[in-house]
Amino acid sequence: MNRRKIEENIFRCFMVLSTFMVVGSLALILVTIFLKGFPALNLDMLIKTPKGGYYIGKEGGILNAILGSIILGIGATFLALIVSLPLVFYLNLYVRKKSKFALIVRFFLDVLWGIPSIVYGAFGFTLMIFFGLRASLLAAMITVALLIIPIMARSMDEVLKMIPFELKEASFALGSTRLETAVKVIFKQALPGIITSILIAFGRGIGDAAAVLFTASFTDSLPYSLFKPVATLPLAIFFQLGTPFPEVQERGYASALVLTGIIFLISIVSRILSKKFSKRIIK
Amino acid sequence: MECKTHISVRDLSVFYGGAQVLNNISIDIPDKKLTAIIGPSGCGKTTLLKSLNRIIDLQDGVRVSGQVFVDGEDIYDPKVEVTHLRKKMGLLLQRPQILPMSIYENVVYGPRIHGVRNKKKLDGLVQCYLKVSGLWNEVKDRLHSPATRLSIGQQQRLCLARGLAVEPEVILGDEPTSALDPISAERIEQRLLELKSQYTVVLVTHNLRQAKRLADYVIFLYLGNLIEHGPTEQILKNPKYVKTQNYINGEFIEELTIDKELNLKATVCPDNFAKAKLALEELKHGQVLKIVVDYEVAVNEVPKAMEFEGHKVLEIKRINQKDWEILIQKRNGVYTI
Amino acid sequence: MNTRKFKDVVAQKIMFLLCIFVVSLAFLIIFGLYHRSMPILAEKNLKDILFSAIWHPAQGQFGLAGFIVGTLWVIGIATILAVPLSILTATYLSEYSHRRIREYIKPIIDLLAGISPVIYGVWGVVAIVPFVRDYLMPFLSEKMPFFPFASDNYTGFAAITGGIVLAVMICPLMISIIGEVIRNVPFEAREASLALGATRWQTVKYVVFKKSWPGIIAAIILGLSRAFGETIAVLMVAGCALNFFPKSIFDPAYPLPALIANTYGEMMSIPLYDAAVLLAAFILLIVSILFNIVGWGILLRIERSQS
């Protein structure tokens, strides 16, 4: 037919193609990790810590890294939560809607959100030196918490912005203070969204390697003290892949499968939770 | 009144998700006449209008059944090239939608996308259709400035010129004057009256006086059903059905008895407000005051001020070159803002 | 004053302090990194560091030019690949696709954004490196042995590999921002164009893009900034050759973040080494802050002009 019809079809093809490429790359990643990792995965990997010579192919597992990552992730998420939750309540309940202050805080959150994790790592490192800390679980927790505060706060803010204004008004009208409104009304309403935000931040925290490179160091033992180095899954993958021994690299793939599995699980759980909770919400 | 049919709608039903918005509409829209679609809000007026050029397809979850024949061709046939169909129909929306470009570019947008490249021809089109829409004299010196700088009334006339520039056969208007001030609205009405000799015009309006002023033919919809249609005189004066009667009686009084007249010609702004207000105070609830004013600010501002006072503005009409007639109905005590 | 009111006021004060903390965090990071990179700035000229290519910490040579050029190659390639991909995908999802398809694809893209950078790195090593080594490089480098393709690095660990992996990593962010910007163009603007008989693509090209280009630019800037700071994945696949200027997409590249990550173990051992590395982090910080200010600034302006 005519030119514009042809142009329309060409671009439609391009669009479908690029959508397929983006979606396909996710499938490709998952398939690759699964195909490479699954054959190397065994129970020993999940329940043992690295024994001597693990990194040249001797026996052992990555339990240290799995536990380390989970503890680090939970700690950092908790720290980030105590900062983010009050912060977003303040922005949505305590200041006027068009407040300059809220605008500035939100803008800073955006900018902090864009700072690369390696920079947070380097900053965590300077903090460590300043306080005379050594690379440890605590230092890593603080660094990762700083990294995920903007992620968590921004998504919680989006959630709270969606809460209908009438609900706040209704609560104020009953004579509640703003704090009571926040805790008893808004928090309950926004809970599914808040949980999703927490899980997103947790997933990001558990998966990040660059921020913990300086601050967590690495260890072959299980995490037992806040002030001792801790192993993390991303770094375990990174190191195992960096060795020249095929057996160790295989285990690296298996570890990658474990990490992907954890992140996949988090994503699914957050989706289910938010669906389940949202039934109780006034829309 | 015998006339050729241009658009013929057969058993048209439209569903949004599960809800049926239009229910088995069958109607013929006459060629080169102005047809008004009236009815209470939410009755499917706009849906009917937008299903005529398949703009309705754009909404998610819409399902259309039935047929619409334009020039004898069913537009819901999958083989129909929808862009050609839409080219045949100019659309005027409630709020003028200016494309993000200059005045000139706005007018030539349509011809360009349909393949007209010749600069001379495009220039000619711009001049021709801006003249038709009565905008030429106001913008001829700034054709290349952004169209967003025009006033909203000018923007609507630009939209009209833009729609005409693709040389359509039909003009569809979705309450095109409802967002405009009285003077701009009157200009659009004038254009539509002139255009109906060359184009088939279909107009959605909630304003029965406007329908009476402009339309040859009226379609009355009620909750998605076609209740009644026919020549304007017949529908507005002798509706057959109770629903039409009720709607028409509730919305509009056919023969207004003017209870008081006030000449506010040559009276300036705060003064004419005060006089109109005083005059209204002397009237009883429901009585009608007629005011005659003679300059633009008053035409726009006096009705606004009286509405602010809680009265109802029934009609704003140009009566000659300079003078405008405003009919206001007195309302007691109810402040509706 | 009763206890309820008291609690409310105390909570307000604490919340306010947390806000101040977040705002000051940005300045704290800037100050902390600047402070720690002072020693090298006191001894050497910033210009020398930025434009010298020789990196030899043991001899006190800290030229960052090689890393900066490496960064530019990698993010250049990533941008060229990711920008069209993201714009087309976002346009497809918001203008063409059925709402149900959009609802299926959205969580996939979210998941793509949530995958750990290390996983991207593993995928790069396992899938993209062999692809570049066995298919792309023989195909391009031998057929077209000139400027951006000619290279004698046959390992597959190259700037293009980093670029491909990065492109996939920044796509989700750009798609979601561009999609949002495009969806904010009022429906009536499309309606006006389509009613004139324009095709979908003409409407997108002349109306939607024209109304949303500042937002699209902002999305690209934010995507660039994301690419700029990405560390581990790029480190794993880009080759990382010291004291080397990549001259081809198949040459190894050593971007700044990779440098910082690679030196974490040794940097306290040599004087000024840590300062040089933290200077690199400082540069990274300043550039990403600038990009983010511009990007979010544009989006904020758009948002405010709409409300």
Image (tube, coloured by chain):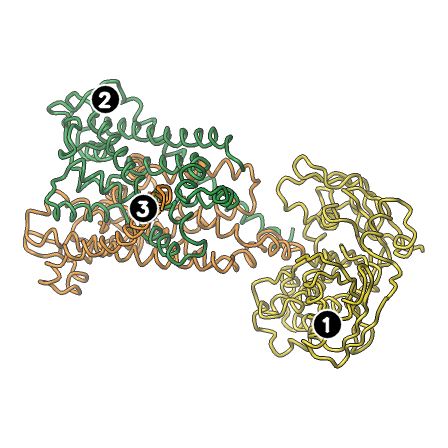
Q: Amino acid at mark 2?
A: Met
Q: Nearer the viewer, residue C82 or B274?
A: B274
Q: Which residue is mark 2?
A: A45
Q: Nearer the viewer, residue A139 or A220?
A: A139
Q: Are marks 3 and 1 on the same chain?
A: no
Vertical order, B93 against A147 (above or below): below
Q: In x, y percent, where is residue C205?
A: 54, 56
Q: On the image, which quarter does residue C31 sit in?
A: bottom left
- Please give the chain letter of the residue carrying mark 1: B
Mark 1: secondary structure: helix
The circle on residue B299 is 1
CA gap between label 1 and label 2 equals: 84 Å
Q: In x, y percent, where is residue C306?
A: 51, 58
Chain letter for yellow, please: B
Choose mark 1 or mark 2, whichever is in front: 1
**Chain A, colour shown:** green
Q: In x, y percent, where is residue A182?
A: 41, 41
Q: Is residue A145 left or right of residue C203?
A: left
